[in-house]
Image (cartoon, rainbow, N blue to C red):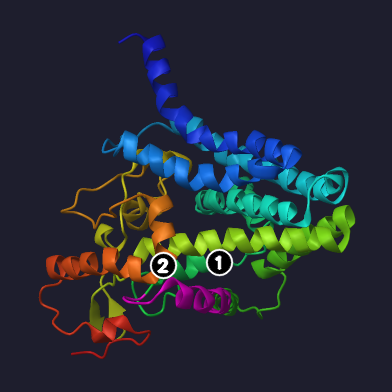
Amino acid sequence: MSSSAQNIGRWQRVLPFWMSLALVPLALFAAIQGGWTLLLLPVITWYFFAALDAVLGLELENLDPHTRDKHVRLYSAVTIIWAPIQFCLLFWMIWYATGPGDAHLSPLETVVLFFGMGVISGTVGINFSHELMHQKNKSERFFADALLAMVLYSHFRSEHLLVHHRYVGTPRDPVTARYNEGFHRFFPRVLVNCFKSAFRAEAAMQERRGKPWYDLSNPFWLYWGLQAYALVLAALIGGWIGVMLFIWQAFVAIWQLELVNYVEHYGLTRKHLGDGKYEHVKPQHSWNAAHKASNWLLINLQRHSDHHYKPNRRFPLLQTYSEEEAPQLPYGYPVMTMAAMVPPIWRKVMNPRVRRWREMYYPEITDWMPYNTARTPKPR
């Protein structure tokens, strides 16, 4: 194959992962037009990609995990440029809604517009920050912090890196949804416990360094500083209404994030080995989804089994797994998160899958009750 044909083929694989950029002109169009166009952002992000998944099916091919960095950068560049793009979009919307747009957008239309903005900053912004926070490059990690500050959820970085990856599938992980725990119970529990666990993890890190928690090297000072900057800027641009709109889109974004967290590990647990120890994290401890279109939008987040198995892999190198290697979701995240909002539907779809997973991977465990609670099972 010629080099030009190889380049064309490479770009054909890369460009679908840049589809999120199309949401920006769509958001601007909706803000200016108002009316029914304000529904386009959630409709396209959820229902359009769910329909595309149904048409395009699964992507079962994997990139070679040893692909050279210069090729991987073609994929990853979109995550780096997104932070300044989202910053400009978000604060332009606050300026527009409280200034020129105030004349033709009703209060309800403004609320719907910033609901759509929250869908963007949650579905794309937090997801991209998740990719960036795993990188060693300081600039990328700063962009991750900037994106999280725009949704007032900066502690997510500490919680995710220091708590979630270490304790996933155990009672010490707040965001592993328990079997039979509905999302509406999960959500308030996570909002409180994630902050607590993140703060405790960073305080413990400071203690190991011989420093108090309030030392300026604690990243919580950076988190609070960036969040305060975002809130002050919203106030300067749009007054108290600008602040309320900023907080509203942040809440929607956090809701989107925790819906995904709920789906990713629902009912899956690591085997307790006694004395508070658990088996190592394996692909079987996260739900996998190989749906093509939603993985384009979510930069392979649905290949979550491999992400926890190999956390340092950049998103294009994440591998998908067969049913024999990892549990599979029946649909992509757009459908599964909607199902999670209706607990009876969720349990009907997912509980039989969790029971099959238990029979497949842990036939020796006959009493699952201790694994369904937030308590550590007693050694047997």
Q: Describe residue 8's horizontal placement relative to residue 123 as left or right.
A: left
Q: Which mark is residue 339?
A: none
Q: Does residue 35 show up magenta in the picture? A: no
Magenta: main secondary structure equals helix
User: How many marks on residues?
Assistant: 2
Q: State the SS at label 2.
A: loop
- Is 204 placed above or below 157 here? below
Instruction: Tell me, yes or no, whether the highlighted magenta stretch contains residue 192.
Output: yes
- Report the residue at 36% width, 40% height from top: 53
Q: Nearer the viewer, residue 368 or 334?
A: 334
Residue lying at 53% horizontally and 45% vertically, measured from the top left: 43
Residue 6 appears at what percent x and percent y? 37, 16
| CA separation in Å, label 2 and label 1 | 30 Å
Residue picked out by circle 2: 342
Res 41 → quadrant: top right
Q: Residues within 10 Å of mark 2 (few under 14, many from 20)?
A: few
Determine whether, in the image, residue 205 is placed left or right of residue 367. Answer: right
How crowded pointer 1 is (Cα within 10 Å; few <14, some 14-19, many 20+) is rated as many
Q: Residue furthest left?
A: 364
In which quadrant is the C terminus drawn? bottom left
In this image, 276 relative to 242: left or right?
left
Identify the residue shown where x is 67% and y is 58%: 249
Q: According to the image, label 1 marks what residue?
A: 158
Residue 113 against residue 49 in the figure, above or below:
below
**Residue extent of the magenta highlight:** 178-198
Type of amino acid under label 1 = Ser
Return the x and y of residue 366 as percentages of the image width and height: 13, 82
